Image (tube, rainbow, N blue to C red):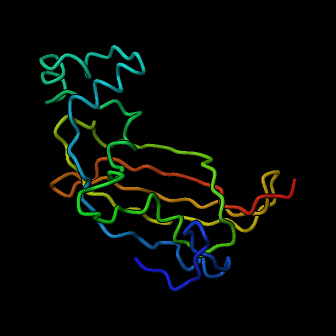
Amino acid sequence: MESTTQRSDVGTALGSYAQAREWIGRRSELRLTDVAVDESRCKLFAALSEDANPAYWDRQWATAQFGAPLAPSGMTMSLIMSLPWKPGGAPNAAPSLAVDVPLPGQTFINVDTDCEFLRPIRWGDHFSVYEEIVDISAEKNTRLGRGHFVTTCMNLLDTKGQLVARLTNVLYRYEAAES
């Protein structure tokens, strides 16, 4: 999705609140994740978080309970992130559609993330993902500076096109206040 607005030095689209409001409901293109959910990443995450849930460790038990071992829910965002580099210099997907929204402000801070799962994420799952702009607040003045709260929703679809999970994210996009 291309923006006809001006870009900052860090690549964020710059524009007005009125321009940004026109983005509500806009969706990114559907993209296939780079890799399927796999045992090694799931076990590494569970090991780093010291989570002994047998759904992540015991293949036989998890398969009997859920049809396959599961991915820890806390790692969902890492499962859908684009690889930071690919041979041939293939372009990677933008980290969030929120950087393309034409707004004042070049600095971001994440405020809230909520995940809704319609079914568990299993080893072997491969997803298609699209993101949608849900809301953009009027300008707010915080200790960080003046800015806008941008709410997005990332939707994960399985290989049959069924919605598996929704990740709703709110970030604050702002111009830093003078110290």
Q: Nearer the viewer, residue 109 or 90?
A: 90
Tag count = 0
Q: Nearer the viewer, residue 20 or 82?
A: 82
Residue drawn at (50%, 59%), measured in percent from left and top?
Answer: 152
Residue drawn at (36%, 62%), measured in percent from left and top?
Answer: 93
Classify residue 31 by image quadrant. Answer: bottom left
Placement of 128 over or under 13, stated as above or below: above
Residue drawn at (12%, 21%), measured in percent from left and top?
Answer: 64
Residue drawn at (67%, 76%), measured in percent from left and top?
Answer: 17
State the residue lying farthest toward the right. 179
State the residue lying farthest toward the bottom. 4
Estimate the x, y position of residue 36 in percent, counting from the top left: 20, 44
State the residue lying farthest toward the front. 88
Estimate the x, y position of residue 7 in percent, counting from the top left: 58, 76
Estimate the x, y position of residue 66 in percent, counting from the top left: 19, 28
Classify residue 89 by image quadrant. Answer: bottom left
Quadrant placement of the N terminus = bottom left
Placement of 147 over or under 166, stated as above or below: below
Residue 36 placement, left or right of 7: left
Residue 81 placement, left or right of 8: left
Estimate the x, y position of residue 98 in percent, counting from the top left: 53, 64
